[in-house]
Amino acid sequence: MGTNTSRQHFISNLAGNLDNLREQGLFKKERIIASRQGAEVVCDDGRTLINLCANNYLGLSGDESMVQASIEATEKFGYGLSSVRFICGTQTVHKQLEQAIASFLGTEDCILYAAAFDANGGVFEPLFDENDAIISDALNHASIIDGIRLCKAARYRYAHNDMADLEVQLQAAADKRHRIIVTDGVFSMDGTIAQLDKICELADKYDALVMIDECHASGFMGATGRGTHEHHNVIGKIDIITGTLGKALGGAMGGFTAGRKEVINTLRQKSRPYLFSNTLAPSIAGASLSVLQRLSSSTELRDRLHANTEHFRREIVALGFTIKPGTHPVVPVMLFDAPVAQKFAARLYELGVFVTGFFYPVVPMGQARVRVQLSAAHSIEQLNTALAAFAQAGRELGLIK
Ligand SMILES: *Cc1c(COP(=O)(O)O)cnc(C)c1O
């Protein structure tokens, strides 16, 4: 590589920035799992851990039924398509999955993407322009923020979950052609559920559309797991729903946007991550289809997840820990102080429990925590073992009596 000083400078700059991250304790290290994803995982150091930090809400990620469904789809449809959808990349299984997602969510149609990040990245620019207004919750997911950046619409931001401020922003955007309110259905750091009943009322009052990102809701929120719109009884009132196949709905990867057929058809013509990126692998499409069939015929997994969530929330509070109150399977166990959160997570690892500490800038200063995520795959015995470890680590660090 010799004498190119620009290159040397570039690399040494990066090395310096990485060292700074390490010094500030902000460097993200990845633990390496040597087993399937599940209620328990085996790490590459041979340790078996109870896993409380996956988005594996329905416990399907490592489940044998998913492995078999993906093998069946691979045998029938092959490994991949080597094409985008509109050239020669659409198979019957992709159309069936789109119809199954639409019908599960109560929308007319649905379009698949390689990830929810792409669904959010490709949803705004084809549908809205400089005549329109996008009104976004301040804590919306990074992929929503990036998607909005790619579009020429005027941007309005309302304080997180603040309906009075949302109303102010709607008034400020009153002269625009179309207004759309955009929110995560559930915010993953706190497990906060968006107030969709109130949001839909405000949308009607100010003549706005509503879009929700259901990545932490599809498959288990609401009485039959349809999502936050079912939880708040506003099915049919949401204009655009984006979501992932990479969390509750199987856990591999893939995303979607659902809504009226005119919306979805426009995205098929114009959405760049759809037009210029490869078709979802048939194994994922087939296995995801089997998940939706299963969830449509039984609420068993969803019910078990909520029973586990109630148990953990009740018992962790009984031990003396502070949590963010709520009902979602994301349970933030508040430690407030960043080094304490790191020590606590490290001690839990030694005690056989896998959780991750979150601290500034991922969460606000002074709000450090470990974020527990429950799964339908956890047994009550596993949760009780994990709770005993929380109690031991908490006493050792003087956090509880
Ligand atoms: C995880 C997540 C995404 C991204 O989903 P992928 O399918 O992994 O790209 C988008 N939005 C929200 C709210 C998420 O939690």
Image (tube, rainbow, N blue to C red):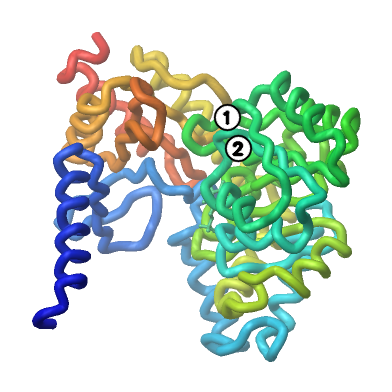
Q: Nearer the viewer, residue 127 or 85?
A: 127
Q: Which mark is residue 10?
A: none
Q: Is residue 220 above or below residue 6?
A: above
Q: Position of residue 133 (x, y in %)?
A: 76, 43
Residue 233 visible, this orientation: no
Spot occupied by residue 348 in the image (x, y as percentages of width and height): 23, 34
Q: Relative to 345, is 265 above or below?
A: below
Q: Residues within 10 Å of mark 1 (few under 14, many from 20)?
A: some
Q: Which residue is mark 1?
A: 192
Image coordinates of residue 192 in percent, x first then y, are: 57, 29
Q: Which residue is mark 2?
A: 186
Question: Upstream in the sequence, badge 2 or badge 1?
Answer: 2
Question: Which residue is at a point 65% across and 62% down the rendered structure image?
Answer: 122
User: Does the CB distance between marks 2 and 1 fall below 8 Å?
Assistant: yes
Q: Provide the secondary structure element on which disc 1 rests.
A: strand
Q: CA distance from mark 2 to mark 1?
A: 6 Å
